[in-house]
Image (cartoon, helix red, strand yellow):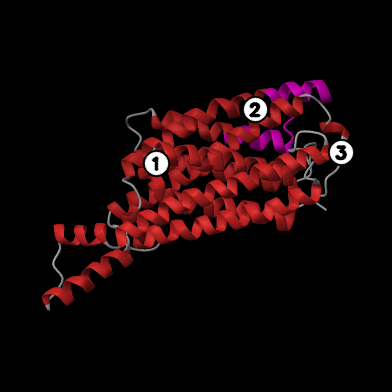
Amino acid sequence: MAPLSDQLLVVAILGYTTALLAHAAEFAFGSRGVVARVAVRERQLLASGGPPVGGPAAATAVDTGNGRWAALAGRAGIALTTAGWLAHLGCLVARGLAAHRVPWGNMYEFVLAVTLVAATAWLILAIARPTLRPLGLFVTLVLLVLLGTAGLRLYTPVGPLVPALDSYWLKIHVTAAVTATGILLVGFVAAALTLIRAGHDAGKTRFPYTLGDRIPAADRLERLTFRIHAFAFPIWTFAVIAGAIWAEAAWGRYWGWDPKETWAFVAWIIYAGYLHARATPSVRRTTATRIAVLGWAAMMVNLFGVNLVIAGLHSYAGVP
């Protein structure tokens, strides 16, 4: 089962890669894409022999030409993401069967589980709200970065748990942390795109704000960002509390300011600050959204920095 898990990871990465290409095609050739607009202008020039004219004709040309292919590419992106998700799920299940335990006992497995939760959350969101499909390009990009890092840098052969992790609290605390982190990954993408679209609407012309006209409206993305974080925050809160209870059982104290505990708490404080700022009328929505992005940065320090750079009681990365 261990070799099967490794092979399925490769299949999952290939699935997400092709999905990213399909979403990129939709992004470029869709009705708002640069390629689509250029194509419309060229058609109008050929038809009229004069300068391009805007208006309904442009939208019709896109909808009946490039727009149709873009929509097909978008649907293919969701289908390919689903195929990658199935291989991803099989990879994690095979890993668990090979290890005879839950498959999130080291950093490699944790990243696999987090990205699976994120892919699941994204598919549910994309199927429920097809108009949000342009986000698929960025979600699959983040998934590929994390999975590629896991496969190339964090890979650990299948083995038993280290004694400190051999507890039923692993199923409670780490499962909650995996779930919250995966959902917050999608929330981070929505928050980052909110800032890009808001910057574009404000007249900023440098990259990445030039991407803004091809993604959903800023206010819609901002509401999505808030809902995702409001859903994930209680789960992260439970993960922190469960970790403290486990620490008391394992080390005889609930809290010791170990680096992992500290950064988990820092992330919790930032996300709590985001939700508070979002609920405060005097705070601008873009300011609150920047706090959400900062929260994800703290989560990445908690995941990678603590395990790979900072030594502590939670240094269970298992990375060779």
- Look at 68% across and 52% down and name the residue there: 9
Q: Earlier in the sequence, mark 1 or mark 2?
A: 2
- Look at 80% across and 47% down and name the residue there: 2
Q: Mark 3 and mark 2: span between their CA atoms? A: 23 Å
Name above or below for residue 94 compared with residue 25. above
Query: In front: mark 1 or mark 2?
Result: 2
- Look at 67% across and 35% down and name the residue there: 262
Q: Secondary structure at mark 1?
A: helix
Answer few, some or many: residues within 10 Å of disc 3's Cα (few below 14, many 20 plus, some between 14 and 19).
Answer: few
Q: Mark 3 and mark 1: span between their CA atoms? A: 45 Å
Q: Earlier in the sequence, mark 3 or mark 2?
A: 3
Q: Earlier in the sequence, mark 3 or mark 1?
A: 3
Nearer to us in this view, 96 or 235: 96
- Image coordinates for residue 12, horizontal then vertical, percent: 63, 52
Quarter-of-image position of residue 169: top right
Q: Amino acid at mark 2?
A: Ala
Nearer to us in this view, 209 or 274: 209
Quarter-of-image position of residue 248: top right
Please indicate, yes or no, whether residue 30 appears anywhere in the rendered image: no
- Look at 25% across and 59% down and name the residue there: 64
Residues tagged 3 and 2 counted as in contact (Cβ below 8 A): no
- Quarter of the rendering occupied by the N terminus: top right
Dot label at residue 239: 2
Location of mark 1 (residue): 287
Name above or below for residue 39 compared with residue 299. below
Q: Amino acid at mark 3?
A: Pro
Q: Which residues are magenta?
A: 242-267
Q: Is residue 103 magenta?
A: no
Location of mark 3 (residue): 160
Q: Amino acid at mark 1?
A: Thr
- Image coordinates for residue 229, horizontal then vertical, percent: 48, 33
Answer few, some or many: residues within 10 Å of disc 2's Cα (few below 14, many 20 plus, some between 14 and 19).
Answer: many
